[in-house]
Image (cartoon, rainbow, N blue to C red):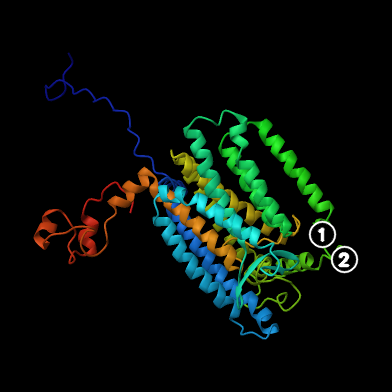
Amino acid sequence: MPSSRTGRPPVQGASRRPAVPGPRRDSPVQRFYMRAKKAWDRPLTAYYLILGGSVLITVLGLVMVYSASQVTALQMALPGSYFFRKQLLAAVLGGVLMFVASRMPVKLHRALAYPILACAVFLMALVQVPGIGKTVNGNQNWIALGGSFQIQPSEFGKLALVLWGADLIARKQEKKLLTQWKHMLVPLVPVTFLLLGLIMLGGDMGTTIILTAVLFGLLWLAGAPTRLFAMVLQIAALLAFVAIKTSPNRMARLACIGATEPKTGVADCWQAVHGIYALASGGLFGSGLGASVEKWGQLPEAHTDFIFAVTGEELGLAGTLSVLALFAALGYAGIRVAGRTEDPFVRYAAGGVTTWIMAQAVINIGAVLGLLPIAGVPLPLFSYGGSALLPTMFAIGLLIAFARDDPAARAALAMRQPRFGRKRGAGGSAPARRQAGAPRRWNTMRRRASRARSSGER
């Protein structure tokens, strides 16, 4: 063996180890995407989307009702805030209904299905009694309550159909009767046609379309075969064709789809065209809140059916896209609640409410954009009208209750700790609460941050 100059054997060079790649660093976009996905998959995501989205839509609707209704109120020799105050009162009452509905157990919702249906049918039949029913804009579907207050029973018919239809289908599913077509259709379809007939006696085609959409939504969730869908769709299409063909007013509305200038004669497209003018003049960020021009007598029903057009004129494309995003979030949350539950009633009721709100929003916005005929339905939670706002907010309370009833959501809510004060429901003396692990009032934010958090959602 050769030796070195020092007499020592040569040291062999140590073999180089392969370089170990360091931890992979994701880009900021990927980190943001993963955080958003993690937050999106949390158990309380649907709960927050429903609650936050509905509150934001209602508040923004109050602002736009105040802006769009001032001119109409002054033309009627009323105070400028007249319609806003009535809508604010309805929003407060609707908020109470939403809170009550969100705290009610599912069994109580099912128990209320038949009483609500019976009351809705009674009131809708009472509309046709001379001296009681009131005609507004050619439709006799209102009941005067005295003074300036009136109620539209057909709006409560939507809530009645959702609750009763969900309870009916859930009971038949528990008894395994949905495999037979007669149990799938009877008595759901006949009762729905009864409601549609009472509404059509007053001439309200828009509400009829929404109830039909709710019926199809319930049948789809129940797993109705294609043959039943086709049969019910053919009957509904035939009745709609007869209703439109026999009414010059409805034929004129159908002729105004895509109109760009007002027409003379039977097809007067003044409202549809000026709705397009309002949207077109808004630009990207609008002319400013309260600065609408079309609401000064050019655009009929500016604070009710065409409030979306005034929103586009004053808040621009950014405002209209914000409203669409809020409705999209609300619709996604409703679908998520219906898809993740194991309770048949919750699935059908959540799907029915989501179908109702989304169908009504699409019909209203489509009419304002000139893509659909003007059906005379308000934008849910947004347009002026207490009769439409109250049952809609109760239905939102249903979705909130269903979102809270999910097992994962219940666990996440139970693990949340209050920021200040003692633990919810913790009794006994202060030392006993401290021994049980309850947070102290004098704990600082740094101590709270250093404490190991549980895996539950806050």
* Residue 49 coordinates in the image, percent (x, y): 47, 55
Q: Quadrant of the C terminus?
A: bottom left
Amino acid beneath label 2: Lys
- Can you give x and y, in whole percent of width and height, for residue 232 in the image? 69, 38
Q: Earlier in the sequence, mark 1 or mark 2?
A: 1
Q: Is residue 43 visible?
A: no
* Disc 2 packing (10 Å; few <14; some 14–19; many ≥20): few
Seen at 73% across and 71% down, the residue is 300
Within 10 angstroms of label 1, few (less than 14), some, or many (20 or more) residues?
A: many
Element type where label 1 sits in the image: loop
Where's residue 263, x and y in %? 87, 65
Answer left or right for 99 relative to 84.
left
Of residues 314 and 166, which is closer to you in this image? 166
**Marks 1 and 2, how far apart in space?**
9 Å
**Does the CB distance between marks 1 and 2 fall below 8 Å?**
yes
Q: Is residue 106 visible?
A: yes
Q: Quadrant of residue 376?
A: bottom right
Which residue is located at x 63 percent, y 52 percent? 359
Whole-percent x and y of residue 231? 71, 35
Relative to residue 265, is residue 340 depicted above or below?
Answer: above
Badge 1 amino acid: Cys
Q: Compared with residue 93, is residue 348 higher up or lower down, i.e. above or below?
A: above
Q: Secondary structure at mark 2?
A: loop
Residue 151's disc number: none
Residue sitting at the far top = 1
Q: Residue at x 64, y 64 (%)?
A: 317
Q: Is residue 51 above or below residue 91?
A: above
Q: For the N terminus, give its image quadrant.
A: top left
Frontmost residue, 333 versus 141: 141
Q: How many marks?
A: 2
Residue behind mark 2: 263
Which residue in the structure is indicated by mark 1? 256
